Structure formats: structure tokens, C-alpha cells
Image (tube, rainbow, N blue to C red):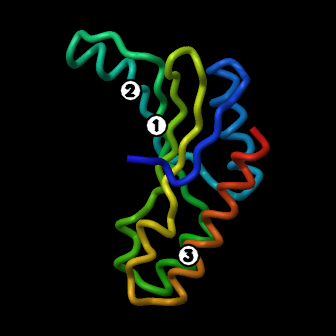
Amino acid sequence: MKCGLKKKVTLPFAQSIANIKKELSNEGFLVLTEFNMRAILKDALGVEFESYILLGVLNPAFTHRILISQKEAGIFLPIQIAIYEEFGEIWVCSELASDSMGGAENPQLADIAAEMDISIGRAMERV
């Protein structure tokens, strides 16, 4: 499996999380959910895992346009973004809205999803 957008980050883990949240906010995205997968796995299974945060984000303006275009497309929201550590390196990885919504037979929806991908990509570039 591969991420839609993926970037290696040179900042420490906590700073990477703060920066991606800030840059997503600058693009109009809200963080709706934040899961600390390391803590969840430790609590539920008693296993150690590298640092891993999963954010569920959406941009209200894009969301409004998506729901007007096709109400069923709401099931593809929020967009998931992972910030994780692997072999001592920090990565930011986002799904592509165009992957999840691109299969719809709705060209308007596909266009909005492509715009979302570009917006998230801009945020990731600045981290």
C-alpha cells in the first residue's frame, strides 16, 4: 500500500505534528479527530510501537461543495493524514481525496477532490 502524498520531515515528531496542523489550518482544514496509535496499541494490546498520530481533517468549504455535489460522498470524509516514525525518520502521509472520490461518476466531485489534493499537498510542502 502506498500513500497518496508522502513526505519525509526533518523536524522532531511533536513539532512535525504541530506544523502539519498549522499548515492544514492555513489551507482552511480543521482537525476533527486525532488518534495516538502508539498509546492505543499500548493500552489495548500491551505492545510497543513507534510514534504514530492519525488525524482526520476536513475543509468546510470543500465539504460543503462535496455534499452539494453528491451527499453520499460524505462517507469519504474526513481525509486521513498520518504522522509517524519509521526507523528513526518522521513521515507525513495523506490519502488522496481523488482516490476515494474519483470513482464516482460525477465530474464535479472529481474536480473538488483534485482541488483538495492540491491544497493538502501545499500544506505538506510547507512542513
Q: Name the amino acid type tagged 3.
A: His
Q: Which mark is residue 64?
A: 3
Compared to residue 46, the image places residue 96 above or below, namely below
Which amino acid, by three-letter code, is at mark 2?
Met
- In-image side of 23 versus 67 (left or right): right
User: Local crowd at mark 2 within 10 Å, few (<14), some, or many (≥20)?
Assistant: some
Element under label 2?
A: helix
The amino acid type, in three-letter code, at marker 1 is: Leu
Q: Residue at x 72, y 50 (%)?
A: 123
- Residue at mark 2 to residue at mark 1: CA–CA distance: 7 Å
**Label 1 crowd bin: few (<14), some (14–19), many (20+), radius 10 Å:** some
Q: Earlier in the sequence, mark 1 or mark 3?
A: 1
Could you give the CA–CA distance between mark 2 and mark 3, rounded to whole angstroms?
30 Å
62 up-or-down from 92: above or below: below
The C terminus, quarter of image: top right
Q: Is residue 116 above or below residue 13?
A: below
Mark 2 highlights which residue?
37
4 to 114, vertically: above or below: above
Front of the two marks 2 and 3: 2
What residue appears at the point 74 percent right and 54 percent down from the top-left corner?
Answer: 122
Q: Which mark is residue 54?
A: 1
Q: Nearer the viewer, residue 92 or 74?
A: 92
The label shown at residue 100 is none
Residue 87 horizontal/vertical position (percent): 51, 17
Sequence-wise first label, 2 or 3: 2
Query: Do the numbered discs 2 and 1 sit on residues whose CB atoms are within 8 Å?
Result: yes
Q: Which residue shows up at 47% across the image and 36% down it?
A: 34
- Residue 14 location in percent, x, y? 64, 21
